[in-house]
Image (cartoon, rainbow, N blue to C red):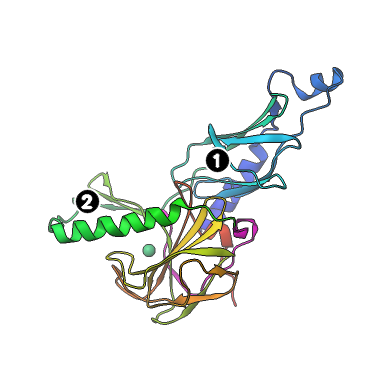
Amino acid sequence: MIIRKTALLIGAALVLLGIGHVSGLNARAAEALGQGATPDFALSGELTQGGWARGQAPRGAVQLSFNGKRLPLAADGRFLIAFDRDAAATAQLSARFADGRTANRALAISPRAWQLEHIPIGPRPGAPPSEDFARRRAGELAQINAARAVDHDSTGWRQKFIWPVYGRLSGRFGSQRIYNGTPGSYHSGLDIATGASGTPFVAPADGVVILAAESPFSLEGRLLMIDHGMGLNSAFLHCSKLAVKVGDVVHQGQYLGNIGMTGRATGPHLHWSIKWRDSRLDPLLFTGAMSPH
Ligand SMILES: [Zn+2]
C-alpha cells in the first residue's frame, strides 16, 4: 500500500518538476545572443523523502552543489544525490561552468505517509545507562563514525540494488511511535525476517567493507558496513556471522554473512539501513518491491 502510494507520488513529482533555468539569461535569450543554451541536468530516480537520484551534470560543468553544499562529480559527469527521511519539499541543484555561469534546477521532493503509531502514554522510563555502558557505547559510535568518514571510490552507487536476502518485511523504514504526543526516534532501516537465524545474505551492490564488528556492538550486534562510493553506504545489523573483513572489495550478489539476532533484537532478522552523507534513506526505494522468487 505504502509502495503504491509512493509510486503515484513520484509520478506526480516528476510531472511537476520544472525545467532548469540559466541564471541571468534564459536559454532562448542566450541562444539569440549566439552563446548557445546552457545544457541542463539529466536526472532520474526516486524524488521523494528517503529516496535518491542519479544524474548527469550539464556538459562543461566544473562544480556541482546540492542545497548549497559542494558535491563530487565523477569523471564522466555522473553524480548521486539523496533525500533524507525528513527532507524539505524542495531541493536545489546547481552547476557552475568554467566561465562563471551557473545552471540551477529546483527539485520537488514528495512527502511520504510514514507509518505512525500513537501510544497514549509516555515512553516507559528505562534504567539510566550505566557508566560502563556509556563508555562502551561511545567507543562503538566512534568506530561507526570513523568508518563512514573515509570515502572509497567504489562504483556501487551506479548500480540498481538487489535484495540482500528474501523474506518478510517485518519493520519498515521511517516508521515511528508517538508517545503521548512526543515522537520517539523513527526506524532507521528495513527489517527482513526469514523466520530463522543463519540465513545467508549478499551484497546489494558493489562496495568496500568499512566496518565488520566481529565482537558484537551493544545495540547493532555483529555489524557490517559497506561503502558503495559517493557517500552512499549500507549497514547490516544483528548478524550471526560475518564472512568478510574490513578492506575487502565486495561485488553485488556476493555472500557477506548470515542473519541473526545479536545486539538488541527481539528475533532473528536483517536490519538493513542506507545512508548518504547525513541523510537516512529507504532501502525499499533502492531495490523496488520484493517480487516473488
Ligand atoms: Zn530494524
Is residue 49 placed above or below 64 in the rendered structure?
below
Q: Quadrant of residue 109?
A: top right
- At numbered mark 1, what does the secondary structure look like: helix, strand or loop? loop
Residue 129: % across, % down: 16, 57
x and y percent of residue 182 in the render? Answer: 25, 45
Q: Residue at the location (43% across, 43% down)? A: 86
User: Callout 1: 10 Å neighbours few (<14), some, many (20+)?
Assistant: many
**Residue type, mark 2 in image:** Pro
Residue shown at 59%/73% (left/top)? 253
Rounded to the nearest angstrom, the CA distance separating label 1 from label 2 is 32 Å
Q: How many marks?
A: 2
Is residue 126 visible in the rendered image? The answer is: no
Q: Is residue 203 left or right of residue 129?
A: right
Q: Position of residue 46 (x, y in %)?
A: 59, 49
Along the viewing direction, whichever of 137 and 166 lies nearer the viewer:
137
Q: Is residue 267 left or right of residue 132?
A: right
Q: Which residues are magenta?
A: 154-175
* Residue 192 drawn in magenta: no
Q: Is mark 2 within 8 Å of ligand 1?
A: no
- Report the image quarter containing ligand 1: bottom left
The residue where tag 2 is placed is: 120
Residue under pointer 1 = 109
Residue 2, x across and y down, in percent: 50, 56
Residue pushed farthest front? 247
Q: Nearer the viewer, mark 1 or mark 2?
A: 1
Task: Based on the picture, tell me whether residue 163 belongs to the magenta stretch.
Answer: yes
Mark closer to the chain start, 1 or 2: 1
Q: Is 90 on the left-hand or right-hand side of 119?
A: right
Q: Main secondary structure of the magenta part?
A: loop
Instruction: Evaluate if marks 1 and 2 touch, with contact meaning CB atoms under 8 Å apart.
Output: no
Q: Which amino acid type is marked by label 1?
A: Ile
- Whether residue 275 is situated above or below residue 34 in the rendered picture: below
